[in-house]
């Protein structure tokens, strides 16, 4: 990516901060904050788009960080920590990223991997505890009996995923089994229909760690 001039950097840092706060700025707000004429702000923003730092989705507040820039900072800062996963939205949308964690020495660096915080103790017998973080490699298909992340409606859940009949118990034809791992708590395996529009495999878990 091309380097930015001092003026371009000031404009970009303001826009980036507003986007991180989930408050996309208008061109007028950019001009007012930096004491610029609107024509000057428009020109500087145009340079930022031309240099692939920003994209414009249209509308009054359509400025967003570009895919190229997000990949650049991801490589520099580590894996993105995703705060939420919602149906119909890109997992690594800027508004879903809470920060970055550098785990390259532990798990290597994946171009599109991310980190997700675990909520609940349904996988405790696998050593994945409430409040832990799992490293996820995005994929739409997953190996049978692999621990993965599935989006049910708008809730991301970590479970062992069975796609074919398993020896551990009954399997319903045409369904996917989401098996928990906490015998003491008595969680039950959940069966879902393949192709259900409210269900989506997000990725496979490649690591787990705990913040101390």
Image (tube, helix red, strand yellow):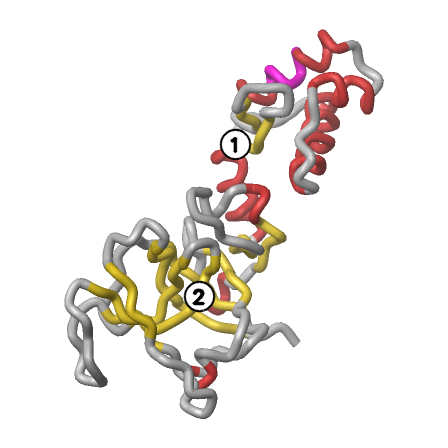
Instruction: Indicate yes or no whether the magenta region holds residue 46.
Output: yes
In terms of depth relative to the viewer, which is nearer, 16 or 170? 170
- In what element is the residue under mark 2? strand
3D distance between C-alphas at marks 1 and 2: 29 Å
Residue furthest to the right in view is 35
Choose top left, top right, bottom left or bottom right for residue 17: top right
Q: Is residue 51 visible?
A: no
- Which secondary structure lies at badge 1? loop
Task: State the residue lying farthest toward the top.
Answer: 39
The residue positioned 48% from the left and 49% from the top of the image is 86
Question: Going 60% across and 17% down the picture, which residue do you hit?
Answer: 47
Give the label on residue 106, or none: none
Name the foreground residue: 172 vs 45: 172
What stretch of residues is rendered in magenta? 43-47
| Residue 49 % position (x, y) | 56, 21
Q: Residues within 10 Å of mark 2 (few under 14, many from 20)?
A: some
Q: Residue 87: give x, y in percent of width and height.
A: 43, 48
The picture places residue 14, in percent across and down from the top left corner, at: 73, 31
Q: Earlier in the sequence, mark 1 or mark 2?
A: 1
Is the stretch drawn in magenta largely helix, strand or loop?
A: helix
Q: Quadrant of the C terminus?
A: bottom right
Q: Residue at x 69, y 30 (%)?
A: 15
Residue position for label 1: 66
Residue 99: tell me if it is visible: yes
Residue under numbered circle 2: 157
Horizontally, is 151 left or right of 21 in the view?
A: left
């Amino acid at each position: 990516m091309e380097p930015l001039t001092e003026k371009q950097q000031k404009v970009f840092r303001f826009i980036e901060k507003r986007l991180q706060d989930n408050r996309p700025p208008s061109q007028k707000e950019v001009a007012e904050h930096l004491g610029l004429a609107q024509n000057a702000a428009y020109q500087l923003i145009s340079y930022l788009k031309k240099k692939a730092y920003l994209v414009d989705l249209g509308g009054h507040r359509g400025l967003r960080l570009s895919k190229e820039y997000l990949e650049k900072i991801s490589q520099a800062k580590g894996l993105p920590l995703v705060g939420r996963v919602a149906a119909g939205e890109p997992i690594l949308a800027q508004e879903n990223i809470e920060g970055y964690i550098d785990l390259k020495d532990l798990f290597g660096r994946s171009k599109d991997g991310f980190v997700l915080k675990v909520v609940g103790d349904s996988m405790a017998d696998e050593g994945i505890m409430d409040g832990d973080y799992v490293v996820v490699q995005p994929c739409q298909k997953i190996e049978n009996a692999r621990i993965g992340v599935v989006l049910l409606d708008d809730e991301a859940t970590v479970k062992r995923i069975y796609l074919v009949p398993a020896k551990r118990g009954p399997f319903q034809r045409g369904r996917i089994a989401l098996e928990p791992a906490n015998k003491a708590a008595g969680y039950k395996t959940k069966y879902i229909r393949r192709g259900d529009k409210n269900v989506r495999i997000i990725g496979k878990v490649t690591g787990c760690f705990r913040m101390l």
